[in-house]
Amino acid sequence: MRLTAIAAILLSAAGLAAEDKPVRIFMYSEYIDPALAETFKARTGYTLDVQLYEAQEEMIAKLQTGGTDQYDVLVATGLLVKQMVALKLVQPLDQALIPNKANVGKQFLDTAFDKGNTYSYPYFWGTSGLMYDPAKVQGEPTWAWVMDPAKAPGPFTLLDEARTTLGSALVWQGKSMNSRVPAEVKAASEAVGAAKHSPKCLGFAGGVDGKNRVVGGEAVVAMVYNGDAARGIADKPGLQYAIPKEGAEIWCDLMLISAKAPNKAGAHALINFLLDAEVAAQNANFIQYASPVEAAKPKIKPELLNNPAIYPSAEVMKRLTYLEDLGKDSRMWDAAWTSVKSQ
Amino acid sequence: MASHLVVDGYLTTRPRLYGRGGLLIAGAFLWMGLFLFAPLGGLAGLAFAQRGEYGGVEWIFSWANLTRLAGWDEFGFSWSHLTILWRSVWLATVTTLLCLLLGFPMAFWIAAKRPAQRPLLLALVMVPSCVNLVIRTYAWQQFLGSQMPAAWLAQSLGLVPEGAALYPTVTAVYLGMVSCMLPFTVLPLYTSVERLDWSLVEAARDLHAGRWRTFRHGILAQCMPGLLAATILTFIPALGMFVISDMLGGAKFLLVGNLIQQQFGSMNDWPFGAMAGLFLVLASLVALWGLRIVSEREAPHHGARR
Amino acid sequence: MRNLPRWISPVSWIGLAILYIPLLAVGILSFNATRYGQQWGGFTTAWYAMMATNDAILAAAWNSLLVGVASTVIATVLGTLLALGLHRTPWPRWFRRGSDLAINLPVVTPDIILAIALVGAFAVLREWWAVFKPGLVTLIVAHATFQISFVTLVVSSRLATIGRDQVEAARDLYANTGQIWLRVLLPQLMPGIIAGALLAFTISLDDFVVSFFVSGPDATTLPLLIYASVRRGVTPEIHALSTIIVAGTMLAIIAVAWMQARRDAKPTE
């Protein structure tokens, strides 16, 4: 902070166009290459101020309690966009200020959660699947490893996320991940409930904890996000990450502009900056999640591009589904998840 | 004219005492009124509203949140919420008992030291609370991990399978809970124990009272204010605590704290969250009222009484 | 104090062990070269160096300290006065019972409910008074709001054990009310006030939920930073900072105790 302040003073003294208004981005920790702050400052004159949340739901709660005038750019998963628009937490983008949108891969534009990209552009994307020790499991990866106690190859953990875990159980049972049929959701919750009560189940965990249990050898298989898996595999080569044969969730985190952003121009500048091919490549090399910026690919390290845990093959991509906002039916899902976790 | 009365051996009038007392309590009550009581009243209104389709609040008033809290959800009646409540109360009760069992001896142990050493030991009890709860709980995870001495010991004794960690287990949850809450038990207990009038204890002994009766009538009765404060400061936070059970118990079972928190988070159902939260507040206040009445009955009938 | 049963001491040591095991683990982790995961990767002091140059961590630690001290001072003054006002006044029974419940309210209210109530109050107040924009001021006010109760509870339990006799003895010696309060009540209350303040301070240091909602972008506290980092795994820098906080607090305590011992060692006049 102090260094950037000194840098700002030096820059303005040198007569460069230095705005002292910062651009505030609200995101997960370790989700942007800190070195980019300097590049951003040099290119646009704005200071980058990274603010952290622990969970995206918390961010929404914070915005709802009058936090919209505190942040400029928000990072949120696609699933939440409809809700954020309905709650008037975000504002439409000025498309003319984001020429770098041309760099984004086609499959990440004009998606179901934000038709025409009125509000958002993608930041990073990923999947949730199974991380496992291949020495201790046999056969093709399947959700049965963590959903069917009889077929579990050993101790396992599930993700502590209602939509992802229940959704995966639905997919395993051959249903839609976004099912609105109460009987189907109930059946899925019963399956997860039975899995939970198995002595092999080490519980519901965040992605990091699940990964740590597999790396530590305490669990044989864990349901995790691909980014955590990639780190775990780097720690202990030989472990693997796979999308189960039944299919799994694909998620995409988006950049949006807060409804009352104090620095609207800066917010657009930041989104445009992060969609720049060079910048996106540098960021992707640091974060090690998959970048939706197609133009950045030539500059992304080949070992990342060729890592199936980060960039799945086209065949695997076909088995991936986005979670959708369920509107009124989310109450039913909430009840199902509560019953899983209470009995 | 107001009648006169004697306080602290000093002749005064009731209005004068009220004036002085009113001034003393005005600051705190104004502060709390503005920032707490008034907004909590607003939340009580929210508790009867409804969640909008996308999570906002629709100001349609109904009893729906109340029946939902009792257990009627989209799939008909379920015991979910009552189970959650019962589990939380049980966890908090056992934690409080464990903390009292450890905290009482610790309070005596500290109070028995030389006066110069007492603040030092008291501070020693408080120091761990300077480290964030999540950090300490994470540290318990590491300590109970499969490659650590504690797990090796348990493995070699055959208590857990080879290569297994000591968490998530019930024991781990209680270790974490006690570790977190113990300072809040010791502190208020100590303030009472330190003031203990030992002549009363000796009087009981001189009357050939048994050990238990000496303890109960000589010691416990005198420590009642501290015991009450310790119970409240341990039980109530333990009732709302869920981070420890999530991190050391594998997040397999919801507690009241989770239920309320997730209404303001992933479920985005603020009205129901407000209803569940206010229910917990009211239930706790009723419990406190009961405790207060019990303790007033137990309080010693000597100078310590107001 | 008189002859305590023998088992008191070992039980107390068990209690202390349960309190200190996690701190020991934190200390060890802060010297572990492995960044993510639990394996021992060799001894290093690199995390301390990284922590010392991490502006975000230092700023958060400073904010936490500032908020903790300021809110504790406010809460200790208001809370102690409240306890005195309630105890030293012959209030009618209904009033005493009512205020008893009011004092317990912040203790029994779940964090998240407190947080929502406080942000609500600040949002309304902000309409008239810009001071209530999310930041250090709101953090301090919010923390003090729930701390008052904890101070009052601890001080009250101390007040209840202070006998009337000393006050009456002082009165017999023609002490006036001010002298009684300053020279008789206050010194006897001091351990209670200190205990209450300590309790309040640690609660402030540990608070996440309320802080998350009432803080603004310029007022990140340590718990906010820590909770945010948990998602990607607690970093050893946080462990290093925690170790320094514990070590620093310990040193301060030992220093105070040492000075006390020296003062006591001097021949009494």
Image: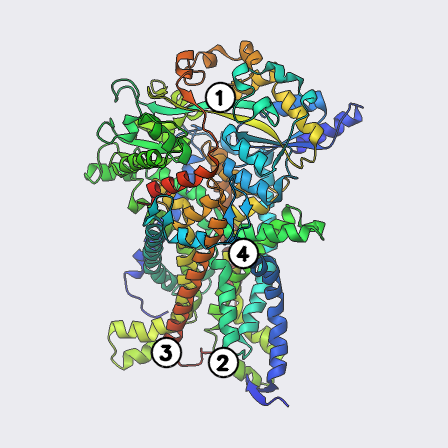
Distance, label 3 to label 2, CA atoms, is 17 Å
Say which chain tag 1 marks. Answer: A
| Residue holding disc 2 | C164
Q: Residues within 10 Å of mark 2 (few under 14, many from 20)?
A: some
The residue lying furthest to the left in this view is: B158
Q: Secondary structure at mark 3?
A: helix
Colour scheme of the rendered structure: rainbow
Among the 4 quarters of the image, the one containing residue A258? top right
Q: In the rendered view, tell whether residue C257 sits above or below residue A76.
A: below
Distance, label 3 to label 4, CA atoms, is 54 Å
Are the residues flagged by discs 3 and 2 in contact, CB closer than 8 Å?
no
Which residue sits at x=60%, y=78%? B18
* Residues tagged by mark 1 and mark 4 found on one chain of the structure: no
Q: Residues within 10 Å of mark 3 (few under 14, many from 20)?
A: few
Image quadrant in which the N terminus of chain C is located: bottom left
Residue C228 in the image, given as x and y percentages of width and height: 51, 36
Which residue sits at x=52%, y=41%? B55
| Residue holding disc 3 | B199
| Residue holding disc 1 | A289
Say which chain tag 2 marks. Answer: C
Q: In the rendered view, tell whether residue A66 sits above or below residue C166.
A: above
Distance, label 4 to label 2, CA atoms, is 45 Å
Tell me the mark number nearer the camera, choosing from 1 and 4: 4
Residue A29 in the image, given as x and y percentages of width and height: 53, 32
Tell me the mark number nearer the camera, choosing from 3 and 2: 2
Is residue C195 at least partly visible in the picture? Answer: no
Say which chain tag 3 marks. Answer: B
Of the numbered discs in the image, which one, if any, rests on residue B45? 4
Distance, label 1 to label 2, CA atoms, is 70 Å
Is residue A255 at least partly visible in the picture? Answer: yes
* Residues tagged by mark 4 and mark 2 found on one chain of the structure: no
